[in-house]
Image (cartoon, grey):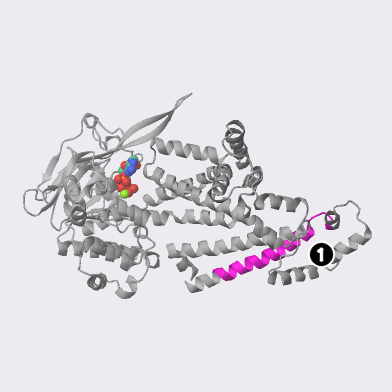
Amino acid sequence: MGGGETDNCVIEVNNVKKYYIRKTRKTTKRWSLINKEKVKSVDGVSFTMNEGEILGVVGESGCGKSTLGKVLVNLESLSEGSVNIRGLNSNLSLKNNQLAFRKKVQIIFQNPFDTFDPRYTIEKILLNVMKLHDVGSNTDERRMKCIEILENAGLTPAKDILKRYPYELSGGQLQRISIVRSMLLKPDFLVADEPVSMLDVSVRADIMNMLKQVCKIQKTAMVFISHDLAATRYIADRIAVMYLGRIIEIGSTEEIIQNPQHPYTKALISNSMDLDEDIQNKSIIYLKGEPPTPVNAGPGCFFEPRCPISRASCSMQYPDVRAVSNHHEVYCPYGTDELDN
Amino acid sequence: MANYIQKRIITGILIIVVSIVLNFTLIKLSPGDPIRVLSGQDSPSPQMQAELTAKYGLDQSVFMQFINYVGNLAKGDLGVSILSNQPVLKMIMERIGPTLLLALTTAIIALIIGTALGIYCARYRGSRFDNIVSGSSYIFDSMPNFWLGMMLIMIFSSSLGWLPTSGMVDLRTNYTGFNYYLDVFKHWLLPATTIVLVTVPYYFRIARSSIIQVMSEDFITTLRATGMSESRIFNKYVFKNAILPTITVFGINLAYIVTGVAIVEIVFSWPGMGSFMLDAIHRRDYPLLMGIYLLLSISVAIMMIIVDVIYAYLDPRILYKER
Ligand SMILES: Nc1ncnc2c1ncn2[C@@H]1O[C@H](COP(=O)(O)OP(=O)(O)OP(=O)(O)O)[C@@H](O)[C@H]1O
Ligand SMILES: [Mg+2]
């Protein structure tokens, strides 16, 4: 799994948890009581990543992908566990020098139309970031650099784009600018939270290519969050599948797609129309019920209530990790051969 | 921008023109025989009737009356009050000072207090302070201003005897200099408190909700992710985006400044436009009413232009949509 001990290691995530307290109303015959319940959005996630590596994180809506992304870049504090970036604890780095930490760790959001303050031109937005982080020594130099990087990102004519306001640009253009803005800081680690899901299908591939290319060139480790398996397969070196706040299977992209070991992974793949037909299961695996909210899962396997091949033992205790190969781990002791019949 | 301002000004002028026509028509259509009112008698003598009719042009066609009216307006002549026989403009000018004093000061104080409370409560949302202020805002918002005014009079004037009940100065004394201002301040305190208490909730709720809304916007999270400090994010981004609705409400408040505090003025016998306007309505003093309404429509039109321009300056999207 990754290379935790080598110098290449960019990020080390150790048993990270994020719990929210949610107030709900419980109505009995006479009283309406306010109940506090713990939402375990992220419930013990660990992995490591190397320079330039792209890890796809997939899972149903509400499984905690965005929360994980925000915790990794420290926009949300974590409830338990730790994140080390280049060997340094994130919480400490943020406390010591928040600017330096923020420069190394970047995030790109889903909705490019909401990413920028509507009152500023693109030029102002980019210059502000550069100034904040001392990129370039004066405004002229910074402006030259803006033009250069916009042109490299295919945003031409750059001089014209710089003068525009966010609402005068398309979603694809704005998402490119988001990427440009993050990457000009040369971060070690980047989270992209569903960066193409709001965009036209026609520009998705271009944006993903751009992301992939810039991460490889700048040796930035990227967590690519998506619920689109085909897109994730295209961009990611490894894939982590999440269910109710936990990673239930992680491995190199082709292993996960070709040889899924968790029934949930298998179900996701069988439901993904965009994947090649030879990989897709002949019959789609339908899951029972809705994806539950992560309040009181367990004590057994979280997926057990919806699992098509669950056994009595599955509800007893959470399954241990099973190594399928060097680069492939799964939290299900049984495998998915049964589902093929 | 110049184009945009030009458009606003043209719209403003149109509003004033339309309101001149409307005011004139409405007043002509309203019931009551002005001659009877003018003479102060139920059945004035024919000679008196003729005199008054000629003097005020009431014998001419309505259209001619309108033409005369507009022509006089252009000369700055708003006509002569039927009741006091004085030029309307002069009468308004005498009365508008106290109204502006009361309405402007309270508008600014309410704006500052309400917005400051709103900002504070938005930042510490859910705190005990926030709960108390938010709760009280609903209480004061639902209080009629005349009722609150009378309560304050009962408590602070009648019972405690700390403050005067009515007027703007004590007519029995002849204060000068500092003592005069102190006297005006004492008279001002209760009506001002009344107005501020019922206006603060508007500013409070608008500031609080728009700041909470802007703080949850994605672009604020993005700024945080770039490493900008919280205080800078707040001052430079949250505040400037969240202040737009407050500007609108303040603009509307100022637009109706001439008549906005009329009821409170009447409760406290403040010598401003309020009681004056009430009299004009009661006694069907047409020229005076037309003068007041004209002033009102001009101030509405001007404030509308100013608010629109400030808005466009603060939020460039508006100019964009305009194109
Ligand atoms: N601020 C919060 N307070 C309370 N609960 C939250 C908060 N943020 C997220 N949650 C809960 O945590 C769970 C995971 O949410 P999250 O947004 O991480 O899911 P996601 O995998 O990104 O879903 P999607 O695919 O819809 O974006 C959800 O049940 C959500 O309701
Ligand atoms: Mg999400």
- The chain holding disc 1 is B
Q: Is residue A3 left or right of residue A331?
A: left
> Which residue is more in the foreground, A276 or A68?
A68
- In front: A321, or B249? B249
Query: Magenta-highlighted stretch: main secondary structure?
Result: helix
Residue A284 in sight here: no
For the record, the magenta segment spans: B8-34
Instruction: In the rendered view, tell whether residue B146 sits above or below residue B252.
Output: above
Query: Residue A172's spot in the image, x, y percent?
Result: 33, 65
Left or right for A17, reference B211:
left
Q: Residue at x 43, y 36 (%)?
A: B131
Q: Is residue B252 above or below residue B309?
A: above
In the picture, the quarter occupied by the C terminus of chain A is top left
Residue A231: x %, y % from top left: 26, 58
Between A33 and B25, the one lying in front of the other is B25
Residue at 46% from the left image edge and 56% from the top image edge:
B244
**Residue A65 percent coordinates (x, y):** 27, 47
Q: Picture quarter containing residue A102?
A: bottom left
Q: Is residue A231 visible?
A: yes
Q: Secondary structure at mark 1?
A: helix
Disc 1: which residue? B56
Please give the count of numbered marks on the rendered protein.
1
Measured as percent of width and height from the top left, residue B39 is found at 86, 55
**What residue do we see at 69% from left, 61% from top?**
B90
